[in-house]
Image (cartoon, rainbow, N blue to C red):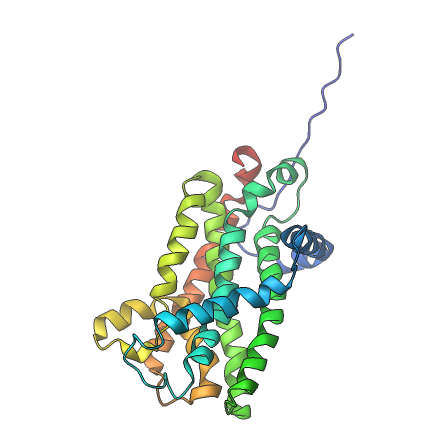
Amino acid sequence: MQAQQKENIISSDRSVILNLSELWSYRELFYFFTWREVKVKYKQTALGVIWVVLQPLIMVAIFSFFFGHALKNDNFLGLPYPVFVFSGLLLWNFFSSSVNTAGNSMLTNAPIIKKIYFPRIIIPVSALLVSGVDFIVAFVAFVVTLIYYQVHVDVLALIVFWPLALVFVLLGTLGISCGLAALNVKYRDFRYIIPFGLQIALFVSPVIYPASNTSNPWVNYVLALNPMYAAINFFRVPLTGTSEMNFFLVMISSVSAIVFLLLGIYYFKKTEAFFADIA
């Protein structure tokens, strides 16, 4: 008597359009993946979540020591350099952590992907949620830094520009994360390219220097293609005012974030059906 073979059929939505209602129906999976990653991230660490605060503070100290005096700028848009660089690192660390984790997330979760169907985009989005938890903790340290240096914050500008900064950092991060997650499934070289690319991207983003420091207009146009350019500039407006912000370059960066979002999700959805075969 021949043994019956069980065949696992994995159905999937082959549409390239993001189905928000379907994502909502799987909302408990967001919680599962996010909480699991948070526990794994800080498991068996002596300091635990304190690392979220220590990492940006150590980077602020290093950049202040090496670049605070080397860069020819006395006040960095009117801010003490530690505050200036922390305001950029806060968003950058969210972006970098999300992209690095999400970029490898499909391979990390390959056993689950091969067994059951669920919207695959939940996996890279969960990486953003984990980084969001880190962002909130680091943000508290940033507020303490503002108080320590007695930095004046324009409350009205804060209400307008900080939400804008968060929106555009989320748009750009989600698009790039989804695109790289899909690419990494097919081309495993991206597991090495992603961390190397993030190291380079840090120095072409206005994190450790003001965007206005670059005098060559063509270089500015290229730098503005970075979706983080707009987000970081928006985030600093309540601290520095809008006089130093080039609205045309910020608009280019904002459009770039939207384009990255659309292209990243489109490519992810287009290749999603084949993840179980090649992951």
Residue 200 percent location from the top left of the image: 35, 58
Front one among 15 and 223:
223
Looking at the image, the residue that sits furthest to the top is: 1
Visible residue check, residue 215: yes
Q: Which residue is drawn at 58% across and 81% down?
A: 144
Visible residue check, residue 265: no
Q: Quadrant of the C terminus?
A: top right
Q: Which residue is drawn at 50% across and 44% down?
A: 271
Q: Is residue 38 left or right of residue 251?
A: right
Total numbered labels placed on residues in the image? 0
Residue 7 percent location from the top left of the image: 69, 26
Task: Reply above or below: 153 against 113.
Answer: below
Q: Which residue is drawn at 53% across and 52% down?
A: 102
Q: Quadrant of the N terminus?
A: top right
Q: Residue at x 49, y 63 (%)?
A: 95
Q: In this view, does 255 lie to the left or right of 32?
A: left
